[in-house]
Amino acid sequence: GNAPPPMTQAPKSYIAPPGSYGKIKISIEPTDTKYAKDLATYPPDKSGLWTAPMETDGWFLEHCNIRSECTKMADVLDKLGTKTLEEWEIESLRSWFANHNLHIHEHHMHEDNIFTPFMQTRINLPEKLTTDHVQLVALLKAVMTIVEGQLASASVLRPAFEEYQKMLFTHLKEEEEIGLPLLRAYFAPEEVAPKTQEIINQTAPHILGGFFYHLDAEGGSKGAINQFMAQEGIPFFVYYIAFSPMRQKYFDTTQVHIDALLAGKPPPAPKKGCLCL
């Protein structure tokens, strides 16, 4: 088939690929019996069944996706500084944040409604992991209020965004160092796979495209996406019918605004006939 046209690339520094975060430091002892709901029926003895490292786990990769988005926006806000924003810059910021807001909203919903209850069938999860979302939602809402208001300059947005990003990154780290090791101790890979599939099925296509876009510094190369698919046992043809178009949709609806704001040139008009959500 025809190769998709090359995507214009933001400078490499704007995508922090998963590999750039180093190894996850496990900050608890997952086999500590205090985490067990029913030690006899569900002992924490499954960690050895996981052949893929934690650093290629979909949960961690999704966190890297979120971190990449935030890091790029922080760079944009730095670049825009205190200058008076042009109309197109305000529109691009609003478009990007609308998608980021949807992304984070879906991410929390998937954890709260699918993943956390699933984990709690066998694990006494530390309360902090489940209560942080309330505060994070409030911090993001404060950011969105500014974005949707009189956005005279990026400097009015920066303090709220920094506060949100700081708490978000701390929370993601805690989930990786506590939640992920517990998940792997109490559940086998084949028990988790259907839940992952459920989340993929419930994610808006252009949002899921961002997950693939941030798998590597190339903006979601075919190799990186295929590697993830092989690990998850997803058939190869799904790349052509779903994942590659989704990645392109993320680029067209979301990444274009980052590139435009960094370049100081308005984004291209949406393609004719493109159902840009």
Image: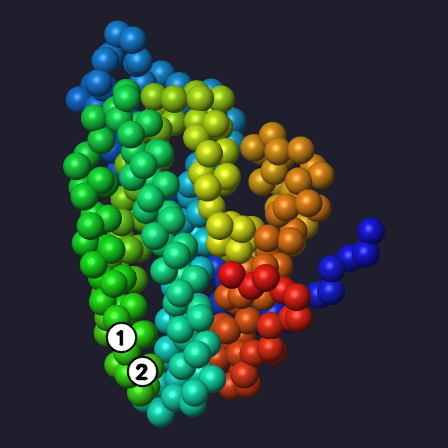
Closer to the camera in the image, 100 or 71: 100
Q: Position of residue 241 (x, y in %)?
A: 68, 45
Among the 4 quarters of the image, the one containing residue 146: bottom left
Tell me the CA gap for discs 1 and 2.
7 Å
Q: Residue furthest top?
A: 40
Callout 2 secondary element: loop
- Residue at 66% x, 66% y is 273
Closer to the camera in the image, 25 or 104: 104
Q: Earlier in the sequence, mark 1 or mark 2?
A: 1
The vertical placement of 131 against 258, above or below, is: above
Q: Which residue is mark 1?
A: 146
Residue 133 is left or right of residue 247, and the answer is left
Amino acid type of the residue tagged 1 in the rendering: Ile
- Residue at 34% x, 21% y is 186
Callout 1 secondary element: helix
Q: Are marks 1 and 2 in contact (CB under 8 Å)?
A: yes
Amino acid type of the residue tagged 2 in the rendering: Leu
Q: What is the number of the mark on residue 151? A: 2
The vertical placement of 97 against 131, above or below, is: below
